[in-house]
Amino acid sequence: MSVFDDQVTDDVQRAFLDADGPAETIQYIPRVGASRYILAVIQRQTPVPLMGTTQDVTAKALVIVANHATRGISSATLDTGGDKIRFALRRGGTAESFPVKLSKAAETNDPGCLAMEV
C-alpha cells in the first residue's frame, strides 16, 4: 500500500472504531490462539425467516472491525472455518458466540475495515 492508503486506513480505523463513538467491545475467538477483546461497530438486524424452515434469510448482525492484526482482525489470518466472535445480539443482553463469515453485501472489506455477518 502507499503512504496515502496507510494514512486513510489509520484515520478510518481511529475515527470509526472509537470506544467513545459507535464502537463496542466484542470478543474475538480465533480457532488457533488466544482470544482477545477488540472494538467493533455492530449493526443488529431483525432476521427474516425463510417460509417453511427455521433458517434465516438475512444475517442477524453485520459486525465491522478494523482490518488489522492487533486492533481488529486481519483479513489475511481470518479463518471463516473456525474463528468466532462473541457479543450480545441485543444491547445489554447475554453475549453469545457466533461463527464468522465475510459479508458479501457490505463493501467494507478493504484495507481499513472488515465486515462479517453472523
Image: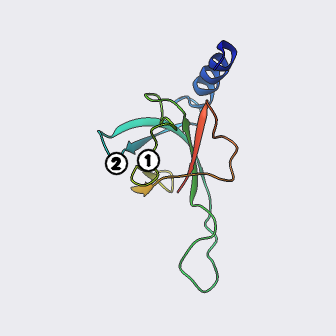
Question: Which labelled disc corresponds to residue 66?
Answer: none
In this rendering, position of residue 46 left or right of residue 34: right
Res 22 → quadrant? top right
User: Disc 2 versus disc 1: distance between alpha carbons?
Assistant: 7 Å
In this rendering, position of residue 33 left or right of residue 79: left
- Closest to the observer: 33 or 48? 33
In this rendering, position of residue 44 left or right of residue 76: right
Tell me if I can see residue 99 in this picture. yes
Q: Amino acid at mark 1?
A: Asp
Q: Residues within 10 Å of mark 2 (few under 14, many from 20)?
A: some
Q: How many marks?
A: 2
Do labels 2 and 1 touch, CB within 8 Å? Answer: yes
**Looking at this rendering, what residue extends furthest in the top direction?**
3
In this rendering, position of residue 113 left or right of residue 31: right
**Residue on which disc 1 sits:** 79
Query: What is the basis of the colouring in this image?
Result: rainbow
**Looking at this rendering, what residue extends furthest in the bottom direction?**
52
Q: Earlier in the sequence, mark 2 or mark 1?
A: 2
Question: Which labelled disc corresponds to residue 31?
Answer: 2
Res 56 → quadrant? bottom right
Q: Secondary structure at mark 1?
A: loop
Residue 99, percent across and down? Answer: 44, 56
Res 93 → quadrant? bottom left
Q: Secondary structure at mark 2?
A: loop
- Residue at image position (62%, 18%) is 6
- Closest to the observer: 81 or 99? 81
